Amino acid sequence: MSLPARGVFGERILALADEIARHSEAGDNLTCTYLTPAHHAAASLLLHWMRQAGLKAEIDATANVVGRLPSVMPGAKTLIIGSHYDTVRNAGKYDGRLGILTGLVVLEHLIRVGAELPFNVELIAFSEEEGVRFATPFIGSHAIVGKFDTAILERTDRAGLHLFEVMMEAGLDLKKIPSLARDPASLLGYLEVHIEQGPVLLREDLPVGIVSAIAGARRQVLTVTGQTGHAGTVPMLGRHDAAAAAAEIVLFVEQRCSRGDTLVGTVGQLNVPQGAINTIPGRCELSLDIRAGDNATRDSAIDDITAECAAIAARRGVTIESREVMNSAAAPCAPRLQLVFADAVKRAGYRAHTLLSGAGHDAMVFNGVCDIGMLFVRCGNGGISHSPLETVAASDADAGARVLLDALMHVG
Ligand SMILES: [Zn+2]
C-alpha cells in the first residue's frame, strides 16, 4: 500500500490536537470535562472530522463519537480503535486525543487509497474516561461493553447537577444506553494508541512501545493508633508513636515494591490528624497504592506489607487497621495483538520494546470482553502528563500512526 511521506501523519495529528484543544471550559488552560460546552464542541469537531475522512459517524447516547468503516466482507467482525476526548483539569493536549487522532488519520488514509479490510473498523472517541466531573470514570467505554451502571446517574457534579439531568439536557437518550453494548462475539479486538505518560520510552530512546498489560491497582487506607503524650515528659522508651510506626511502613513499602519488575508501591497521603509540634502522635493515617502487571505479584506484596504491619504493631504497641478502597484486576494485553504491534514496530525500523502501563486506560474496560492491544507513543518533557507541559514530537506521533496502519494490515 502507498504511504504518505514520512512526517505527514504526525504533523496532521499534532495540528488536529491543537485545534481541538481550543475548546476548553477554562480560560487559561485545557479542561474538557463530561458534557460541558467545551466537551460538546470537541465532540462536534470529531464528528465533522470523522465524516470528512469518509467514516459513517454519529454521536451515541453517552456522547461517544463513533465512526465506522464497514468491511466488504459479509458477516465480518469488528475491530474497535478507541481512546477518550475528555480531559483532566489543566490537562495536556495528547492524553486520550492522540489515540483518537492517530486512528482518524490512519482510517482516512485507508479510505483514500481504497484499501479493503476483512473486518469492520469502529473508531470510538470515548466521551468520558478521567472521571473528573462526576467522580466516576469510563462512562463512555462502559456503555460500549454493556457495563454502564445506572446507579451513577444519581451522581452530582460540583454545582449539584445530577448526571441524568446533564445527560438529558444534552439531548442524550438514556433509554438507548443498553443498546450501545457490543456483542463480544462480534468483536475482533480492541486497539488503543496512547501517550505513555511516563519516561520509559524516553530512556529507551524509542518512539513507540508495546504494552504488555495495564497494571491492576489495590488501594488501602491504613490507620495507625498509638498513644499521644507530652513531647517533653514521656521518655523515649515506652512511647507508642503512631507516626514513627507509619514511617516504618512507608520505608517497608518502598523496599518491598522495589523487588519486582512491574511492581510499584506508593504512600501518597500521610497525615497526623490534630498533630502538634509538642505532642507524640497518637494517630496517623496513610494511603497505600500498589500496582503490578499481574494480580499475583501485587497481591503477594500486599500480603507482605500486611504481615510487616502486624509485626510493627506488635513491636511498638500500636494498632494498625486497613481498609481496602479499590481493587482492580490487571488487564493483560493479548499476546497475539502484542505480536502484531511488535512486528509492525520492527518493520517500521525500531526495536520492539514491551512495557507495562501503570495508568488505567479505556482498554482495561475491554478486558474479558475481547482481546486488547495497546501501543504507547513516547511522551516528551521527561514523561510529564496530566499537565500543560505534556508534549509529543510530531515524528513520534508519525511513528505511532505508521505502526497502527501496518498493524491493521496484519491483524485480520
Ligand atoms: Zn488517557
Image (cartoon, grey):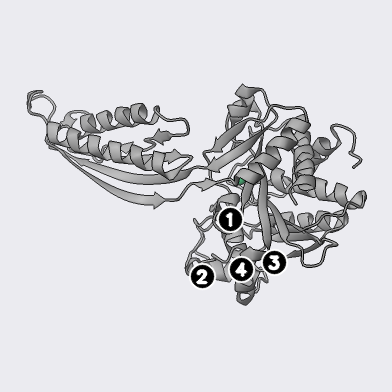
**Can residue 31 be seen in this snapshot?**
no
Sequence-wise, the earlier of marks 3 and 2 is 3
- From mark 2 to mark 4, how far is it between C-alphas? 12 Å
Q: Nearer the viewer, mark 2 or mark 4?
A: 2
Q: Are marks 3 and 4 in contact (CB under 8 Å)?
A: no
Q: Are marks 2 and 4 in contact (CB under 8 Å)?
A: no
Sequence-wise, the earlier of marks 2 and 4 is 2
Tell me residue 4's x, y (percent). 90, 38
Where does label 4 land, which residue? Answer: 167
> What amino acid is labelled 4 in the image?
Met
Which type of secondary structure does the marked residue at label 4 adopt?
helix
- The image quadrant where one finds the N terminus is top right
> What amino acid is labelled 2 in the image?
Thr
Q: Are marks 4 and 1 in contact (CB under 8 Å)?
A: no
Horizontally, residue 241 falls left or right of residue 134, namely: left
Where does label 1 land, which residue? Answer: 366
Which type of secondary structure does the marked residue at label 1 adopt?
helix
- From mark 3 to mark 1, how far is it between C-alphas? 18 Å
What is the crowding at mark 3: few (fewer than 14 residues within 10 Å), some, or many (at least 20)?
Answer: some
What is the crowding at mark 2: few (fewer than 14 residues within 10 Å), some, or many (at least 20)?
Answer: few
Q: Nearer the viewer, mark 3 or mark 1?
A: 1
- From mark 2 to mark 1, how far is it between C-alphas? 19 Å
Where does label 3 land, which residue? Answer: 60
Tell me residue 205's x, y (percent). 66, 22
